[in-house]
């Protein structure tokens, strides 16, 4: 047995809109986290609401905010970061949270954004190539390991990725990079050099780099060296995922 509340009656189409919300079937005084939205008139620009993905289309998402209220999210408003295969990140009935960008009652149109930069006051923008400076400490994950080194993706960045050359994996000579790192390992790196013309950045992950940074009071990461992988390697990073080094 399921207890429901009749929200709307569509006599011409012989349809009923029902609700199982506790605030509807138990007590109207119960706290409501997500107020029920029955019409566009309840929405205004900058409202932050939650809804369920109704359809994943080529042009974006359609999100159900209520029985007869659907919002549209453009592909450009899905995330602050670049998502190569964005459709795989969303599915029908997935719960999402967004901010209302536009409400057009005559056209029955609602547009919203899922970007964290729009909803979160404490949002930290992703790192870009132009943000990198010598001496800066960053974290990242090993994406791929080769004989000549390991490719690393920088955390919270816009496709900033690069190579940690074998000669810079650790303070001691490393013969086999695969014995030190594997795909998915978390690492911490120091920016050594920025080549703006080739858009390359040389990262240092040797343990000695972090000891020097800590002694100078320049370390911006509260984690210890032992928390971020085997040996602290050096990386050459760029926005080109397939860059390699010969030396």
Image (cartoon, rainbow, N blue to C red):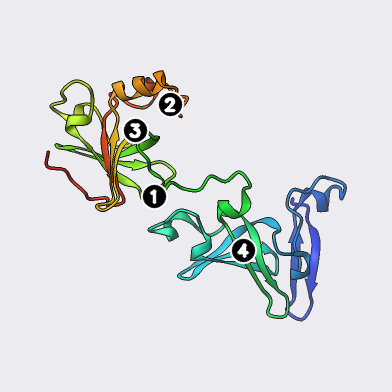
Residue 74 appears at what percent x and percent y? 53, 67
Q: Disc 2 and disc 1: Cα gap in Å? A: 20 Å
Mark 4 element type: strand
- Residue 130 bears which disc, if any? 1
Judge from the rendering whether residue 106 lies leftward or rightward of residue 192; answer left or right: right
Crowding at dot 1, Cα within 10 Å, few <14 / some 14-19 / many 20+, comes out as few
Q: Nearer the viewer, residue 12 or 61?
A: 61
- Confirm whether residue 41 shows in the render: yes
Mark 3 element type: strand
Label 2 or label 4, whichever lies nearer to me, is: 2
Q: Reading the chain from its start, which is encountered first: label 4 or label 1?
A: 4
Does the CB distance between marks 2 and 4 fall below 8 Å?
no
Quarter location, residue 5: bottom right
Q: Residue at x 59, y 60 (%)?
A: 113
Q: Reading the chain from its start, which is encountered first: label 3 or label 2?
A: 3
Label 3 or label 2, whichever lies nearer to me, is: 2
Find disc 2 in the rendering and name its residue: 219
Label 3 or label 1, whichever lies nearer to me, is: 1
Q: Nearer the viewer, residue 76 or 130?
A: 130
Q: Residue at x 37, y 37 (%)?
A: 140
Find disc 3 in the rendering and name its residue: 189
Which corner quadrant holds the C terminus? top left
């Amino acid at each position: 047995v399921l207890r429901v509340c009749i929200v709307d009656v569509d006599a011409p189409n012989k349809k009923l809109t029902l609700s199982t919300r506790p605030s509807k079937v138990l007590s109207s005084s119960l706290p409501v986290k997500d107020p029920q939205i029955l019409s566009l008139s309840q929405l205004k620009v900058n409202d932050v609401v939650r809804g369920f993905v109704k359809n994943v289309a080529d042009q974006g998402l359609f999100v159900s905010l209520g029985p007869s209220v659907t919002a549209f999210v453009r592909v450009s408003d899905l995330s602050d970061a670049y998502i190569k295969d964005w459709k795989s990140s969303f599915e029908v009935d997935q719960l999402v949270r967004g901010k209302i960008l536009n409400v057009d009652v005559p056209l029955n149109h609602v547009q919203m954004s899922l970007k964290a930069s729009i909803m979160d006051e404490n949002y930290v923008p992703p790192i870009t190539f132009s943000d990198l400076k010598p001496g800066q400490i960053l974290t990242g994950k090993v994406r791929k390991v080769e004989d000549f080194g390991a490719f690393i993706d920088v955390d919270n960045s816009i496709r900033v990725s690069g190579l940690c050359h074998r000669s810079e994996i650790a303070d001691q000579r490393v013969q086999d990079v695969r014995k030190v790192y594997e795909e998915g390992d978390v690492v911490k790196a120091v920016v050594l050099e920025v080549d703006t013309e080739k858009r390359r950045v040389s990262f240092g992950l040797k343990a000695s780099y972090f000891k020097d940074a800590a002694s100078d009071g320049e370390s911006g990461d509260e984690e210890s060296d032992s928390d971020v992988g085997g040996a602290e390697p050096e990386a050459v990073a760029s926005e080109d995922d397939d860059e390699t080094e010969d030396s």
